[in-house]
Image: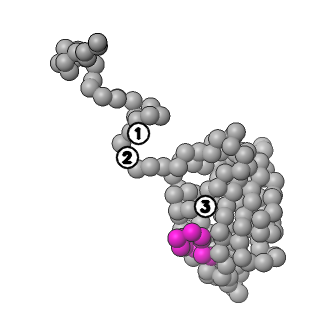
Amino acid sequence: MYTPPPPDQFPEIPDGPSNPSDPYTPGPGPVIPHPPRPDRGWVTCLDDTYWKTESDATWDTDHWDFLGDFAVSIRETGTWAAGFRPSKMRITHDYGPGLELTLGNAGEPGWAYNGEVLSGEEYDLDFTGDSDADITVLEHDAGEEGCDFDITNIEFFS
């Protein structure tokens, strides 16, 4: 029968796990969503652990409420977008036809997608050339007339 040595017998070896990146032992600090992995297919990145309010949008339990004039947007938060280059996006919303959205990034021209988004439809993203940069913002230009709609799902495919 094995009997472990007393803790002070090997003082150079710390007691307990010491590697915060060990998958079986969480490290200290807040839980940050992990970047979606390329082998996962469609990945939901919806809630306020992935995005934060930037302008006239609020997280409301299970959806983003876009309500305001001119640029209404949410900005990525945490580290999930670092190095993440999905090939497609799918947004579920209650706006109806004609919703114009921009998925902005830190590159030039400054977006991976810019155009009309029908609810639940797939759209190709472009991270090539100067657009090879991290996702930064999801924005709707509401103009002077303003907007009021909900986004109930934000998905990316890689």
Between 131 and 81, the one nearer to me in the picture: 81
Answer whether labels 1 and 2 touch (C-beta < 8 Å).
no
Query: Residue at 40% of width from left, 50% of height from top?
Result: 30
Label 2 amino acid? Gly
On-image quarter of the N terminus:
top left
Left/right of residue 103 with respect to residue 63 in the rendered view: right
Looking at the image, residue 39 lies above or below residue 137: above
On-image quarter of the C terminus:
top right
* Mark 1 crowd level (few <14, some 14–19, many ≥20, 10 Å Cα): few
Label 3 amino acid? Leu
Q: For residue 15: magenta? A: no
In which quadrant of the rendered view does residue 155 lie?
Answer: bottom right
Assign a secondary structure to mark 2: loop
Query: Residue at 65% of width from left, 69% of height from top?
Result: 152
* Mark 2 crowd level (few <14, some 14–19, many ≥20, 10 Å Cα): few
In which quadrant of the rendered view does residue 141 lie?
Answer: bottom right
Magenta segment boundaries in residue numbering: 57-66
Answer whether labels 3 and 1 touch (C-beta < 8 Å).
no
- Image location (x, y in percent) of residue 42: 71, 50
Of all residues, the one furthest to the bottom in this rendering is: 145
Label number found at residue 53: none
The answer for how far apart the CA atoms under marks 3 and 1 are is 23 Å
Label number found at residue 29: 2
Q: Which comes sooner in the sequence, label 3 or label 2?
A: 2
Label number found at residue 26: 1
